[in-house]
Amino acid sequence: MSQLFDPTEIKGMEITNRFVRSATWEGLAAEDGSVTPRLTEIALKLVHGGVGLFITGHTYVSREGQATPWQLGIYSDHLITGLSEMVEAVHGAGGKIAIQLAHAGARAAFDLSGLEPIGPSQFAVGMETPGKAMDGKDIDRVIEAFARAATRARAAGFDAIQIHGAHGYLVSQFLSPAFNKRADEYGDSIENRERFVLKIVKAMRTAVGPDFPLLIKINSQDFIPGGFSVEDMLHTSKALQEAGIDAIEMSGGTFASGNKNPSRQGRPRKNESEAYYEHAARRYKERISIPLILVGGIRRFETAEKLVVEGIADYIALSRPLICEPGLINRWKSGDTKPARCISDNGCFKPGFEGKGVSCPVKGRVRSVPIDS
């Protein structure tokens, strides 16, 4: 049996294999951010489909941090009951579930919350309107919001928590010199730009205790001029390891990164790695010892296996392929290792913005383009 199906653990959290469902906005929460039966159904489909660890979609920790409609929330105690019911359903199916805690920062949706977006600086790359530059009180308040959300997550029974520090949302904005133009203790040098996330980690660790798995998702790089670089990523990863983070998921890009945004369309070019961030992952493994979860572009079983066997990554994270094919992992485990059916056209997100939930519009259709082209 492939190493991809070896049981593993992260800080005592036992995982049946090396496949992770990367956090994916489903567009299926209630308007107040509470869990719905359809949201739980998605989690159960993926657990039954063979995913070792299910990570929820980005879950906003405070009202002004909401990014998208029908997004999961954890900003209030009244949401714990629904979250707990989802966790119990996943555990009943034999699965493990982590919650991704997030704040959209300058990318927050004013029309959803009615609250002014906030960020490290007034103007953010790719934003049509400026948001408020956070002062010291704003920073302390958001750090506390993450800590309170972590307390709620543990109370709800989640197996782990992941901080969303990628894709140009708030934590990513602080880390990136393209977004962060501050001249105080939170800006300029990489040590200062890391301060915000390190304070979040410290506050969350205090909230959940020393034995609870804390994960984070960060960019390999921003792929924008003057943005977060691979060298920045390595420095930040080392600092996160020392701060007590138990595993890092590597992604990349922002909404301002053009064709190198987090959800790239199409297939890789000839002689280009299928895994978007393989080179950065190799550099990470040279310096950092905590497990690496790698997401981005992986569509072939052979690619996933190579990444693990060669020690480039410890876990393989998938998003769009599992929207298209929730049972992909079980199919691969059965011996049918044909590539994922996902064609990476991003058509799956349109139904989400229509209130129907993210789903694959081409699933089950005959494709005019071969799957391996």
Image (cartoon, grey):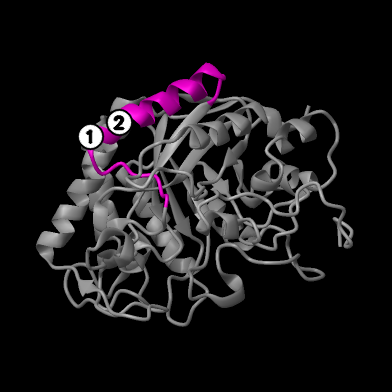
Disc marking residue 77: 1
Place of residue 297 in the rendered image (x, y in percent of width and height, measured from the top left): 67, 57
Disc marking residue 175: none
Compared with 96, 323 (above or below) is below
Q: Looking at the picture, which amino acid does disc 2 mark? A: Ile
Place of residue 201 in the rendered image (x, y in percent of width and height, measured from the top left): 28, 46
Place of residue 222 in the rendered image (x, y in percent of width and height, measured from the top left): 48, 70
**Outermost residue, top side:** 92
Where on the picture, by quarter, is residue 149?
Answer: top left
Q: Looking at the picture, which amino acid does disc 1 mark? A: Asp
**How packed is label 2: few (under 14 Cα within 10 Å), some, or many (20 or more)?**
many
Q: Which residue is mark 2?
A: 80
Between residues 65 and 219, which one lies in front from this camera angle? 65
Question: Could you say whether the residue bearing mark 1 is in a helix, strand or loop?
Answer: helix
Asked if the magenta segment contains residue 146, the reply would be no
Write the start and end of the magenta stretch as one range.
70-95
**How packed is label 1: few (under 14 Cα within 10 Å), some, or many (20 or more)?**
some
Compared with 272, 195 (above or below) is above
Q: Is residue 78 left or right of residue 327?
A: left
Tell me which residue sits at (37%, 31%) in the image.
Answer: 83
Tell me which residue sits at (67%, 31%) in the image.
Answer: 49
Query: Is residue 211 among the parts visible in the rendering?
Result: no
Compared with 326, 155 (above or below) is above
Determine whether label 2 and label 1 are within 8 Å by CB: yes
**Quadrant (top left/top right/bottom left/bottom right) for the N terminus:** top right
